[in-house]
Image (cartoon, rainbow, N blue to C red):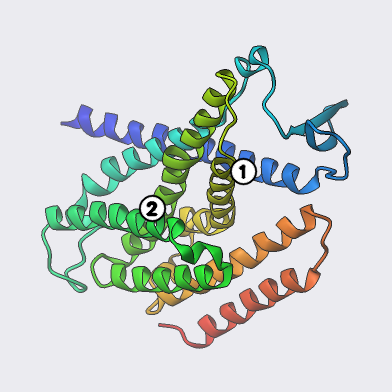
Amino acid sequence: MEVFTYALKWSEVVLRWGHVLFAILWVGNSFLFNYLDNKLNKNITSKDIDGEGYLMHSGFFYKLSRLKTSPNASYLNQLVIFKWQSYLTFITGILLLVVIYYYNSGILMVDKRVLVISPLAAITFSVLSMIISWAIYDFLCKSQLIRNNFLFIVTMLLLLAALSFGLTKIFGSKFAFLSVGLIIGTNMFANVFTVIIPNQMNIINSSKNNKEFDASLSLAAKQRSIHNNYSTFLVLFIMLSGHYSFLVYHKYNWIILCLIAIISALGRHYFNLRGRNIHKPGILFTSIVALILLATVIFMFKN
């Protein structure tokens, strides 16, 4: 038993380490390609090139081109597809969930002061929350609502508030907080696994067979990629939540989480606009002031 416990602790160490490393790679890729899309020079008179950009790194110059059409077959076989960063982040995250929380569900998930449920019921609620949340989000992305950015954002914020509040009525504060990040992270992974990568493979196969690919596939993949991009700051905040228990165990932790979601999205939006040479410091200023105000209110109304 002692050997098993020791092995379990080492598995936690390795999984945590791997989870953070893979998450860094995934987030880095997301930020890089979003930045490149925004920074490419689109004023190019070419039937093949959609945009060009230049970079310098480690003393070397790089020229980047975004193509309107697919490259020839020889280049298609050399394509680098960024997917394993996402896959491994999710896999290590799920394994951590099982090894740490599901294995100790009676202690780390169940809080009888919140709701008296069995450890098995807690695990069931956790799994169902991920599946149902993805189903709802995916449905909304495929509905007409997606055509109206404002209504879609408002709907997602309302769902986030309902989800956060509901989880605090089922689980202990720490796991409820973590579950929101788990659900958003699952949606981000599912975006890659069920939409982005399949659409990309469809485009690649069409190109290899000299067929014209459906442009809507690229648009759908890009849309999900943007959703992932705006979710990143919030997920990282929740990943680090173990370091600020005064927020996690606050009476109104679910409201704090929703406000952090808005503040983090504003910050991400500022940097996305800046990548397109649209400078709106007021957005960044608003997010900083909002964070300061939130911190002040939390201090004034302690538990």
Tag 2: amino acid: Leu
Q: Position of residue 94 (x, y in %)?
A: 34, 41
Q: Position of residue 159 (x, y in %)?
A: 40, 70
Residue 49 shown left or right of residue 155 in the figure:
right
Quadrant in which residue 58 is drawn: top right
Q: Position of residue 108 (x, y in %)?
A: 25, 56
Sequence-wise, which precedes: disc 1 or disc 2? 1
The structure residue drawn at horizontal position 18% and vertical position 53%, both measured from the top left corner, is 124
Front one among 47 and 63 = 47
Residue 154 lies, with reference to residue 201, above or below; the image says below
Front one among 207 and 196 = 207
Residue that carries the numbered disc 2 in the rendered image: 182
Residue 296 lies, with reference to residue 240, above or below; the image says below
Q: Is residue 168 visible?
A: yes
Tag 1: amino acid: Ser
Disc 1 secondary structure class: helix
Q: Position of residue 287 (x, y in %)?
A: 67, 72
Residue 47 shown left or right of residue 240 in the figure:
right
The residues tagged by marks 1 and 2 sit, at their Cα atoms, a distance apart of 18 Å
